[in-house]
Image (cartoon, helix red, strand yellow):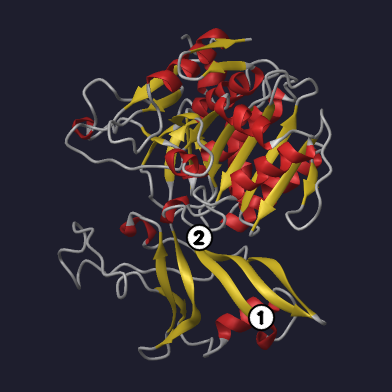
Amino acid sequence: MPVDSAAQAGCPSGAKKDYAHGLVDFVKKCPSMFHTTAALAERLGAEGFQELREGDAWQVERGGRYFVTRNNSSLIAFAVGEVLSDYHFQVAAAHGDSPQFKVKSVAELEGPGDYLRLDTEVYGGMIDHTWLDRPLGVAGRALVREGGRVVSRLVDTRRDVAIIPSVAIHLDRESGRSPELDRACDLVALFSAGDLKAGAFDRMVAEEFGVEPVDVLARDLFLYNRQEPAVWGAAREFVSAPKLDDLGCAYAALEGFLAAGVNDAQVNVYACFDNEEVGSNTKQGAMSTFLKDALDRLNAALGFSAEDLARAVSRSFLVSCDNAHACHPNHPEKHDAVNRCWLNGGIAIKEAANQHYCSDAFSRAVLVAVLDAAGVPHQTFANRSDMAGGGTLGNLSNTQVSMHGVDVGLPQLAMHSCYETAGARDVELGADALQAFFSTDVRIDGADGFELR
């Protein structure tokens, strides 16, 4: 498919939105999974979506648009059709968490000398050495005593407060070439050289809210890379940022969902789950009852029966959105000889015989038919046959709400680095792909066939 110079530059073609820079702005708002959910909720609210709360009775109308959150770190949004003939759900799901260092409850390590360091543990499977010598902030949530209530509040230092220093090569001649690091020793962040004393971290957090440290009862705080995301390159064809896995897909899927509007034949569903990087098996992860609970309640609020819901789910379809491994320019041998994807070639449809991805022939055919009909390019990804590869949330979500599903992702380099790179054009192509999916009425007949309307 020809790519014009504006698209290569990551710029809008004609009146098209500049999705690459939109992603950059989105990433800046999302230093933790709690901030990601808050940013999504803010955007949906601005677009006219009404917030539902799990603890309240739901009033839902055809033609309405709604969203609900769980744990302030996962979100599900609905665009409800007016007609709902052959009622079904079309779902796109991504995740809002990424590998980071989580600060422990007792945050400080004193010494050696007057140094003050932060006691952390790894969240998710990160590339450890990429975190060295980076300016780090602290973000997440805290439970704060305010009068007679304890409330959840977002935390973001919005400044550099820590760094994980490398060992100088003069002190360790192998350090320049070896990526092997001891997480309890080499990856401990420096917080102060002596100006701050014990208790300074807790005081810093409390000052965010104008309270005393004793009033911060608990916290989920993470170190995050403060390096600015950017669209870059001589042809402006790259976008680099922290947390592209999976904020790239979370953003592109949201844009496609919003651009499609309300499809009268169905309920369009956008989900962004927490905890994918640690297995999804939490109350707010893809393996939780969150999606099932939300669909059950929506179904009932629309006046449908449990039998109607079972029939609707059998006709429903999930696009699991989590970034894919673009062919590495220096190590093409790490990839399958022919089932490989490239930057700026469009979303990759991912398959694995071990079912770590939920794609099969039926689900692949559905999405290929949708994208071909819309003229949206797509690629194929499979791991090299002697490599296990990773997994994602599609099959895990299907243990709770089983429907046909396909795994896709934006191609990227350096997955699980603290600073990752993708194609600027792919952000737009990803949004276009999800818009095409949500705009299409996919009529599924078991596993015997389907029709696009």
Q: Position of residue 281 (x, y in %)?
A: 46, 55
Q: Quadrant of residue 434?
A: top right
Q: Please give the count of numbered marks on the rendered protein.
A: 2
Residue wearing tag 2: 224
Q: Is residue 140 above or below residue 433?
A: below
Which numbered disc covers residue 216?
1
For disc 2, the neighbor class at 10 Å (few under 14, some 14 to 19, many from 20) is many
Question: Helix or strand or loop: what does disc 1 sit on?
Answer: strand
Q: Is residue 367 above or below residue 179?
A: above
Amino acid type at circle 2 is Tyr
Is 124 positioned to the left or the right of 35 in the image?
A: left
Q: Is residue 87 above or below residue 38?
A: above
The residue that appears at 54% across and 39% down in the rendered structure is: 401
Q: Position of residue 365 (x, y in %)?
A: 44, 15
The residue that appears at 54% across and 10% down in the rendered structure is: 375
The residue that appears at 75% across and 47% down in the rendered structure is: 42
- The residue mark sitting in front, 2 or 1, is 1
The residue that appears at 41% across and 26% down in the rendered structure is: 348
The mark that comes first in sequence, 2 or 1, is 1
Residues at discs 2 and 1 in contact (Cβ within 8 Å): no
Question: Helix or strand or loop: what does disc 2 sit on?
Answer: strand
- Is residue 29 something that shows in the picture? no
Amino acid type at circle 1 is Val
Q: Quadrant of residue 200?
A: bottom right
